[in-house]
Image (cartoon, grey):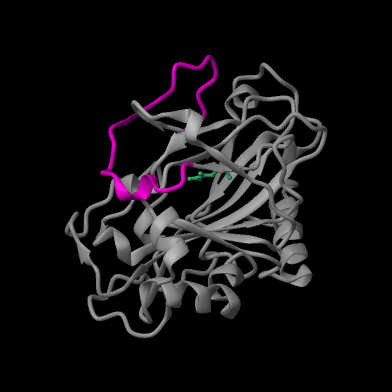
């Protein structure tokens, strides 16, 4: 683990994901959004709350979607978590036996409130120690302060897991909860080009702002845990409707001594 990551809780690798994979992920997202491709088993399509409630009419189906979660059964989207360039960086940070989990295509449409409050991802993971988990977030478009790039609070991963709750905002997106009592003045904006990837610690406080442009702001994220971690939830995880977060866990490198990884499932 290098000193920069240890001190700040994140590091950015420029141009890590190539144009072919970026295009494949974006095409797949739009094909699912447009109904040309059935969502894979366990894939959850999350709509922006203002669109779901009918306050805003989306320009295209993709403009209505804020996330596609748990994508590991999708034959195209799962390529991200198998990408050697990503896995080599992850391995250097958390070791060789790697489980992918909580995979998602992240879309921030314009003209709606798509802000993601500042939060810590460890909230969603059963594995410990936290230092053996890392998130990878890749820009699929140019991401800037204007269209809602990622913001992080450097060094915040050295603190504890904070209490989280929904923010005091008019429009609250599904599971977009924020950490309580944080100093937002310390945040820094991570502007990135397509393919640039940030790796971040699960206790790093991060989030994103409004998309004030006319275009979509698209990104892809997967979290990885060392498969030798302890499962402090002992196999439990609340399912969300028909979606089972643990079905998204996949061994993507090395060995799985506890058998945490789920088997891939094809469409029925
Ligand atoms: O892509 C974004 O805007 C933020 C995503 C994020 O922080 C998350 O899903 O945990």
Question: Can residue 90 be seen?
Answer: yes
Please determine whether, in this image, residue 261 is positioned above or below residue 199: below
Place of residue 49 in the rendered image (x, y in percent of width and height, measured from the top left): 57, 26
Residue 52 sits inside the magenta stretch: no
Which region of the structure is painted magenta? 153-174
Quadrant in which the N terminus appears: bottom left
Please determine whether, in this image, residue 41 is positioned above or below residue 191: below
Q: Residue furthest bottom?
A: 254
Residue at 39% in and 61% down: 6
Residue at 22% in and 75% down: 258
State the image quarter where residue 226 is shown.
Answer: bottom left
Residue at 38% in and 85% down: 254
Question: Can residue 41 be seen?
Answer: no
Place of residue 178 in the rendered image (x, y in percent of width and height, measured from the top left): 41, 31
- Majority secondary structure in the magenta region: loop
Please name whichever residue, 12 or 135, is drawn nearer the observer in this view of the structure.
12
Image side of residue 84 versus residue 9, left or right? right
Please name whichever residue, 134 or 59, is drawn nearer the observer in this view of the structure.
134
State the image quarter where residue 60 is shown.
Answer: top right
State the image quarter where residue 166 is shown.
Answer: top left
Place of residue 91 in the rendered image (x, y in percent of width and height, measured from the top left): 44, 77
Image side of residue 49 versus residue 97, left or right? right
């Amino acid at each position: 683990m290098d000193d920069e990551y240890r001190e700040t809780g994140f590091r950015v690798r420029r141009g890590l994901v190539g144009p072919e994979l970026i295009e494949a992920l974006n095409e797949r997202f739009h094909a699912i959004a447009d109904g040309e491709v059935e969502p894979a088993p366990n894939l959850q399509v999350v709509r922006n709350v203002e669109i779901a409630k009918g306050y805003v009419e989306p320009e295209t189906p993709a403009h209505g979607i804020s996330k596609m979660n748990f994508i590991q059964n999708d034959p195209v989207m799962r390529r991200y978590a198998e990408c050697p360039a990503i896995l080599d960086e992850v391995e250097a940070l958390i070791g060789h036996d790697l489980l992918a989990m909580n995979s998602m295509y992240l879309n921030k449409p314009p003209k709606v409130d798509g802000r993601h409050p500042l939060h810590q991802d460890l909230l969603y993971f059963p594995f410990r120690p936290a230092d053996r988990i890392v998130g990878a977030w890749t820009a699929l478009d140019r991401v800037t302060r204007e269209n809602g790039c990622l913001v992080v609070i450097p060094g915040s991963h050295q603190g504890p897991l904070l209490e989280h709750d929904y923010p005091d905002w008019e429009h609250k997106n599904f599971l977009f909860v924020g950490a309580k009592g944080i100093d937002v003045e310390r945040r820094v904006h991570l502007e990135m080009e397509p393919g640039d990837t940030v790796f971040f610690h699960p206790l790093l406080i991060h989030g994103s702002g409004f998309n004030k442009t006319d275009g979509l702001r698209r990104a892809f994220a997967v979290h990885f845990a060392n498969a030798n971690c302890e499962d402090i939830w002992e196999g439990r995880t609340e399912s969300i409707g028909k979606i089972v977060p643990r079905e998204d866990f996949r061994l993507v490198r090395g060995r799985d001594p506890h058998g945490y990884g789920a088997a891939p499932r094809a469409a029925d």
